[in-house]
Image (tube, helix red, strand yellow):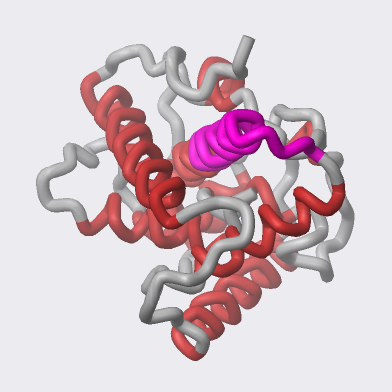
Amino acid sequence: MPSWNVHIAHVERLLDDKTARLDAVIDHDAFVLGNLVPDIYVGYMVPDVSHKIPYKDTHYANPDFVPAPDASLFYRRYIKDKDATDVTLGVWCHLLCDHYYNLRTTQYIARIGIKPGEQTRIRKQADFDLYGHTLSISRVPQLTKEVLGQCDSFEQYRLEEQDLRAAVRAAGRIVDDNRLHHLETTPDYDLLTADFFLATAAEVDHVLREALECCALGQDASHLGNPPS
């Protein structure tokens, strides 16, 4: 699945896009933090959390080989017809990002005739790690009083302040690591390809922009992030 360097890169491109209609996002720190929230209680990106929550409950997906979250279900429960906070919008964007990257990965692997399995998972994750280090990122969310207030009102599950602070520290380490180990040239991917990442990243950028524009215009976005039939 995409790591936080990938999520942060998409958020930065979105927030820096002067042509995008981003009226739905008011507090950028809250939105960036929301884009990290689904991974906090999984226990991998932030290992020192107070407790863990099953992946199926944080991502609306079974922890299969490459799960594609049901981002549409999250939208219908917590955003549609509601005054959603920036944290909640960020969580939705995280699930959309995971959905399309993981869906396209599964489709690509099937198309080239590679069977799912532990070795394929390791190869796939190594490629995502390489890809993440080709991205330039700088944003680390700040836990202001306003951001913590939005976290207190998050509906899906309780967000503990100590865990949010641990997540911000983890995000800072990832941003620093990307700066120190940035890859200036295209890596030699093992399973996926540079064209795959280029196309999928462009698709995700488009989807995230469409998602927020739908919210800004009061349009239904239930069609985004539906699980494959």
Q: Is residue 60 visible?
A: yes
Which residue corresponds to the image point at 40% horizontal and 61% vertical from the top-left? 9
Q: Is residue 182 magenta?
A: no
Which residue corresponds to the image point at 56% horizontal and 57% vertical from the top-left? 148
Which residue corresponds to the image point at 51% horizontal and 34% vertical from the top-left? 100
Vertical placement of residue 80 versus 184, above or below: above
x%, y% of residue 53?
Answer: 84, 44
Residues 99 and 184: in front is 184
Q: Quadrant of the C terminus?
A: top right
Vertical placement of residue 181 versus 123, above or below: below
x%, y% of residue 167?
Answer: 65, 66
Report the side of 121 relative to 169 (left or right). Answer: right
Quarter of the view holding residue 81: top left
- Extent of the magenta region: 95-116
Residues 30 and 178: in front is 178
Vertical placement of residue 155 versus 53, above or below: above
Vertical placement of residue 157 versus 47, above or below: above
Report the side of 20 relative to 210 (left or right). Answer: left
